[in-house]
Amino acid sequence: MDTTATPTLNYLNNGHGLKSWLLTRDHKRIALLYLWSVTAFFFLGGFFALMIRLELLTPASDLVQPDTYNKLFTMHGIVMVFFFLIPSIPATLGNFLIPIMIGAKDLAFPRINLLSWYIYILGGLFTITAALTGGVDTGWTFYAPYSTTASNSNVILAGLGIFITGFSSILTGLNFIVTVHRMRAPGLTWFRLPLFVWSHYATSLIMILGTPVIAITVLLVAVERGLHLGIFDPALGGDPVLFQHLFWFYSHPAVYIMILPAMGVVSELVQAFARKNIFGYAFVAFSSLAIAIIGFLVWGHHLFVSGQSTYAGLVFSIISMFVAIPSAVKVFNWTATLYKGSVSWDSPMLYAFGFIGLFTIGGLTGLFLATLGMDIHMHDTYFIIAHFHYVMVGGAIFGFLGGLHYWWPKITGRMYPEGWAKFACLNIFIGFNLTFGPQFIVGYLGMPRRYAMYAPEFQVWNVLSTAGATILGIGYLIPMVYFTWSIFKGEIASANPWGARGLEWEIPSPPPTENFLVTPIVTHGTHQYAPSHEVGIV
Ligand code: HEM
Ligand SMILES: [Cu+2]
C-alpha cells in the first residue's frame, strides 16, 4: 500500500458545509474549530494590549481614563490566560496530534471533545459580554475583598465565563488521559511515546486536579458578592488571604498548563531539525511529570508580601527553586541533542531556538522572584510583567507558533512560504525583546504595574516598549496572512516534508478521516533517527 500518495478523500473534504463542521466528532476538525477560536481571542487580547501600550506612551493618563485603563489590563489578562494560553496548544495541536501520534482513530470520547469546544465558546461569550456591558476592573487575579465588595464592575459575569470554560479544560484533560491509557496502538509502550504526548499527559493531570479549585474560587467570589456571605471580606468575617491561597493553588500550576505543551513541541522540533534522538528521553519525559507535581507545591511564592509567616515564605521560596530543576533538565537535554546534530534552520526550528533562549531568561528571572528578599523589592513592579511575558509569550507562544509551522503541512496539506515565515519569526523575536526587555529595567527601577500614570523618568523605557509592541503586533499579523494564503495557493505538501520521524509523518497530508487505514504496529520509539532502524509502521 502506498501511504504517501495524497488520497482524494481526507478529513477536510469529507463533508462540506457549516453543519458538517459544527457537528463533527473528528478530533482533527475540532482542533481546527479551536484554532480559529483561540486565534480570535488572541487578537482580541492583543487589541487590549495595544491600547495599554498606547496609554503608557506618555506619563499622563491621556488616551483613556484610569478606570478604563483598569478594565483594559483586566480584560487583556483574562482573555490571554483563560481563553488563549490555556487552550492554545493542547486544544489545537494536542487535539489534532495525540490520536495520530499514538496510532488511534480518534480520542477516547469524541462527543465530549466537541462538547468541550462548545463549553469553551459559551464561557467566552459570557466573558465578552462582561467586557461589553461595563467591563471588569479587578485585574485577572480578582483579588478579594476588592472583587467581592468594592469593585463597581461585572465580576460575577466574568467569573461565570471562567467557571464555565474551566469545564472545557477539565473535559479535555480527562479525554487526553483516557486516550493515552486506552488507545495506544499495539507495541506503543509508555517509553515509546513521543515527548509531545508525555508533556500533554502531564498537562492533563494539572488540568483535572487544578481547574476545580479555580472554579470553586470564582464561585465563592460570586457567592460573597451576590449574597454578602463573609468568605473573603474581613468586614464580613472572611479572610482575604484565603482567596490568594485558593487562587494561586490553581494559577501557579496553570502556568505549567501554558508552558508544558510548548516544551513538548520543542522536544519534537529539536529532534526533527537536528536529526537526532533526544538526549536522555526518560529524563525529559519524567521532568514533565515532576513539573506537574512540584508545580502544585509552590503557590505561596505569590503570597510573600501577604503577611504569611516568614517561615512559610522561606519554605515556598526553597520549593520554588526546586521546580526550576526539571525545567533546567529539559533545557540541558535539548542543548545536548543539538550538540553535533546536523541542525537545519527552517522556521519551526527558529521558533524553537527562540523558545529556548527566551524561556531561559523568563525562568532565570523567576528564580530572582522566588528569592524571598528580592521579591519584596520587585513585587508588583514591571519586573513581574517582564518575567511572565518572557515565559508565556517568549515561551508558550513561540512554542505554539513553532508547532503550528511544523505541523501546518500535515494539517492543511499545503506548505507556507518559508521566506516570509523566517521574516515573521525575526520580526516577532525583535519586537518581543524590545517590548519586554525594557520592562525588566523599568520595573527594577521601581515602576509599579497596573497604573495608567507613571513618573516622567520612566518614559523612555515605555516609549521603547510601545515601539516594540508595535513591531510585535505586526509580526503576529504576518503569519495570519501567509497561512491563509497557503490554504488556497500554497505548494502541495508531501506526507513528510521535513523528513521527520513519528507516526503522524507516515500518513498522508492532510490525514484521512480515520487517520490510519490499517492500525499501525509499533516496533520501537517514534523518534528513531538512527539510520539502521525502519520507520514506525510495519
Ligand atoms: C503584544 C503583546 C503584548 C503586550 C504589548 C502586552 C502588554 C501588557 C501590559 C503593559 C501589561 C500590564 C498591565 C499592568 O498590569 O499594568 C500586561 C499584563 C498582562 N499580560 Fe500582556 N501583553 C502582550 C501580550 C500578552 C500575551 C500574549 C499574554 C498571554 C498569552 C499576556 C498576558 C498578560 C497577563 C496575564 C497580564 C496581567 C494582567 C494583570 O496584571 O492583571 N500578554 N500585558
Ligand atoms: Cu507561581
Image (cartoon, rainbow, N blue to C red):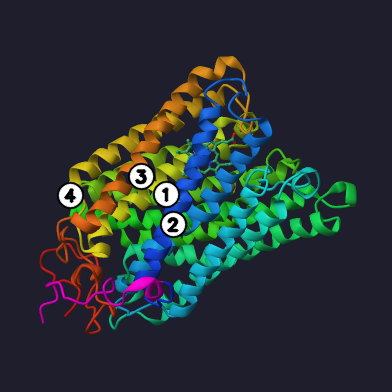
Residue type indicated by callout 1: Ala
Query: Mark 4 and mark 1 in contact (Cβ < 8 Å)?
Result: no
Find residue 409 and report its horizontal and vertical position in percent.
22, 60
Q: Tell me where the magenta segment starts and ends, as one range.
A: 1-21
Q: Nearer the viewer, mark 2 or mark 4?
A: 2
- State whether residue 358 is above or below residue 298: above
Q: Quadrant of the N terminus?
A: bottom left
Does residue 254 appear to the left or right of 414 in the view shown? Answer: right
Mark positioned earlier in the residue sequence (1 or 4): 4
Which residue in the structure is indicated by mark 2? 88
Residue type indicated by callout 2: Ser
Calculate the distance from the C-alpha at mark 3 to the C-alpha at mark 2. Answer: 16 Å
Which residue in the structure is indicated by mark 3? 355
- Disc assigned to residue 281: none
Q: Quadrant of residue 99?
A: bottom left
Which residue in the structure is indicated by mark 1? 396
Query: Mark 2 and mark 1 in contact (Cβ < 8 Å)?
Result: yes
Q: Nearer the viewer, residue 462 or 522?
A: 462
Q: Quadrant of the C terminus?
A: bottom left
